[in-house]
Amino acid sequence: MKRAALTSRMIGLLLLATACPSAGLAQDTLQPYQLVRSLQLVQDRIAAGDHAAMPMQAKLLEMTDARLRAADAEDFKDPKNFRALLVYGMSGGNPVTVEAAVSRAASDPRNLAMAKGVIDYLNGRPGEAIEALRPIDPMTLPGDLGAFLALVKGSLLATDQPAAALTLLDEAKLLSPGTLVEEAALRRSVGIAVTQGDAARFALASTQYVERYLYSPYASQFADSFVSGVIALHMSISQDKLADITSMMDPEREKVIYLRIARRAAIDGMSDLSAFASARAEQGRDGNTNQDDPRALLYSSLSTVTSDTIEDVRTKLGKIDRSKLSDGDRALLDAAQAIAGEVVAPPASLPVANPAPAPVVPSPEPEIAAASTTDAAGLPPVEGAVSEKPALAPLAAAPAAPAAPAAPNTSAPATDAATVLPASAPTVAASADTTDPTDAAMTKTRRQLDLIDQMLGAAPK
């Protein structure tokens, strides 16, 4: 309660300062560490789902950048200002500003080495950054700086040393609970756990993320990692555990997650998982079923398209409203109908005895390959969740045995750019098209969020 009151008070003062004609003077009189602390408080509110604070974040980044550009050696004699400079850089700040300010700072060799590592990281030199930061233990630093450094080191080591990366991400969460740092650390832990095949770690991190940060503007990236993780670890995660995690979501998010799982599982030939996810998507919650959702009907049909009840499946497929499906799902529907038609087609007539030789003409295959040209799945975003665009594997005439899928790319979201939507309303209306029109301001905000997230620990490209 005290922290929330302090945050509101500081933000109110800053709003007054920026609104008055003497805003420049107010900005100059504030110390860098005061501005950076205010920036952190705003970012923590955004991570918790307060998307209305995003304009304040942009303003604070602008003010802090200007103040640090004007800072001199005298300012950086205060250790708090030097730490604030590094935190600003790892919070989405301008790397040019950080490098210029560090060149003016007179600090001890250890701090300058740490600054070099941060600058290398911000400028996309991960190898140099790892070497510079390797001897520095985040747990020995003040909490605000140590948390960011643990997050950055954990992200840098995620590919080559995933076990060490998970330890560092745990330290980041320990040093900065309830913050944007913890949100990023949890989100990255989910992805690394998938690549490690650690189902228990995956389930724990997913549970904690859903409990605390479901309305974060970065939740779209969590949704991607979560769906990919369920597919990759489907033999190790029970359906009961999956249901426990999704039950903490609001009904619309839960439905969308299950639709995405059902689609991926059906394409990959995981009939049991696809049937379970489709049933959960249709079941709904609080008496609101989704049995009329054409996507749920399609995905559940894909999991049973070669079953003994093929006539029922064909009838079900025939009732699906194609106009409410995306291009990719219409291709899936065509493929499913083609397979169902092959299953019930009468066998070819037996050849007559001793027929005259005739040229062998291959019988045409059903146009199933059309399903490989994928489009958006037509699933509504999960508060900014992006829909997958996986390469669709050709559907066989019989369900394929579950194969071990390739480990997902957890260092970045799926192919779509995250669509950031306001979190004031916890649910998002379902639509058949995932392409939502956005104005220039929202586009700019989304790009800034992506940049800040990269600075918060995404391995540089």
Image: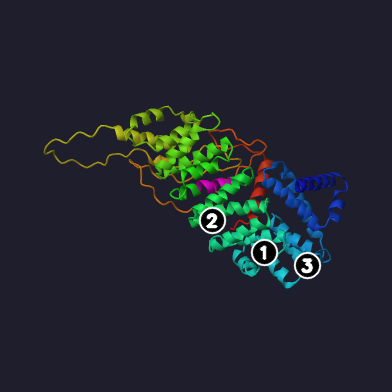
Instruction: Identify the residue under disc 3.
Output: 105
| Earlier-in-chain disc, 1 versus 3 | 3
Query: Which residue occupies the foreground of this view, 425 or 121?
Result: 425
Q: What numbered label is drawn on residue 455?
A: none
Position of residue 13 in the picture relative to residue 152 (left or right): right
Which of the two marks, 1 or 3, is nearer to us in this view?
1
Measure how far apart labels 1 and 2 are at the Cα level.
22 Å
| Earlier-in-chain disc, 1 versus 2 | 1
Which of the two marks, 1 or 2, is nearer to us in this view?
1
User: Magenta segment, which residues?
Assistant: 220-228
| Earlier-in-chain disc, 3 versus 2 | 3
Instruction: Identify the residue under disc 1.
Output: 139
Question: Is 81 one of the magenta-colored residues?
Answer: no
Which residue type carries mark 2? Ile
Which residue type carries mark 1? Met
Measure how far apart labels 3 and 2 are at the Cα level.
37 Å
Q: Is residue 190 visible?
A: yes
Instruction: Identify the residue under disc 2.
Output: 192
Can you give x and y, in whole percent of width and height, for residue 241 in the image?
A: 50, 45
**What is the number of callouts on the image?**
3
Relative to 227, say whether 109 is above or below. Answer: below
Which residue type carries mark 3? Ala
- Label 1's element? helix
